[in-house]
Image: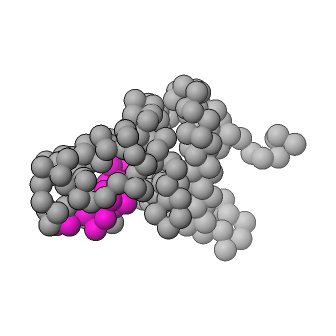
């Protein structure tokens, strides 16, 4: 994704995609439909995003991840994650449809990439290296492990209809992430 900041056109395009997704699968929505709904011309879209999947990734970053970062940076990980999942609950229909996108531009891979990036940027590299018994256990491998775990949990939560409240989902995920696997056997 390009180094995109939040501006009015981006928000309008995002809202247009969300509104269109109420009646159609996201992968069937065209750029023309997005721009027509937004009241802009197609070149305007391409000045901001390469395709609708980059727009979807922008929505994930700007509406879910970035607002939660100040909480996480203040050591309030649980509260940051609760913000993310509460925001997803509020737009359940949109995120349920987004989760159906598979393949190269899958929603799951977007969530994975965002989570991995957040973890890598905030990870205590020295702590990881000091706890790792082997040199091949790199901070990137640790970040991938936790990001993939979160991604699987998120996709299951969405596929299950988001029936578990966001705060309960976060509580369970956090306790699983903190609990050594040996303790459950």
Quadrant hosting residue 18: top left
Image quadrant occupied by the C terminus: top right
Q: Is residue 79 visible?
A: no
Magenta stretch, main secondary structure, is: helix
Q: Position of residue 175 (x, y in %)?
A: 65, 35
Q: Is residue 185 visible?
A: yes
Who's the residue at 25% across and 43% down the image? Answer: 15
Who's the residue at 20% across and 67% down the image? Answer: 46
| Position of residue 181 in the picture relative to residue 49 (left or right) | right
Q: Is residue 52 magenta?
A: yes
Q: Position of residue 112 (x, y in %)?
A: 51, 57
| Position of residue 163 in the picture relative to residue 62 (left or right) | right
Q: Is residue 175 magenta?
A: no
| Position of residue 167 in the picture relative to residue 74 (left or right) | right
Q: Nearer the viewer, residue 166 or 137?
A: 166
Q: Position of residue 29 (x, y in %)?
A: 35, 54
The magenta region covers: 46-63
* Vertical relation: 181 (above or below) 81: below
| Position of residue 133 in the picture relative to residue 109 (left or right) | right
Who's the residue at 42% across and 56% down the image? Answer: 27
Q: Nearer the viewer, residue 17 or 127?
A: 17
How are the colours assigned in the image?
Answer: one colour
* Vertical relation: 160 (above or below) 165: below
Who's the residue at 67% across and 74% down the image? Answer: 136
């Amino acid at each position: 994704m390009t180094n995109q900041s939040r501006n009015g056109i981006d928000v309008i395009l995002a809202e247009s995609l969300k509104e269109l997704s109420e009646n159609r699968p996201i992968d069937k929505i065209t750029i023309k439909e997005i721009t027509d709904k937004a009241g802009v011309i197609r070149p305007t879209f391409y000045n901001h995003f390469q395709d609708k999947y980059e727009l979807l990734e922008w929505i994930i970053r700007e509406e879910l991840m970035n607002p939660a970062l100040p909480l996480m940076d203040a050591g309030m990980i649980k509260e940051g994650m609760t913000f993310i999942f509460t925001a997803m609950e509020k737009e359940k229909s949109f995120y349920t449809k987004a989760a159906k996108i598979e393949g190269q531009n899958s929603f799951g891979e977007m969530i994975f990439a965002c989570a991995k990036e957040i973890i890598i940027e905030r990870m205590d590299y020295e702590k990881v290296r000091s706890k790792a018994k082997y040199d091949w256990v790199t901070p990137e491998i640790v970040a991938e492990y936790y990001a993939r775990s979160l991604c699987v949990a998120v996709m299951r939560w969405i596929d299950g209809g988001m029936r578990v409240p966001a705060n309960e989902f976060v509580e369970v995920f956090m306790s699983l992430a903190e609990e050594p696997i040996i303790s459950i056997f």
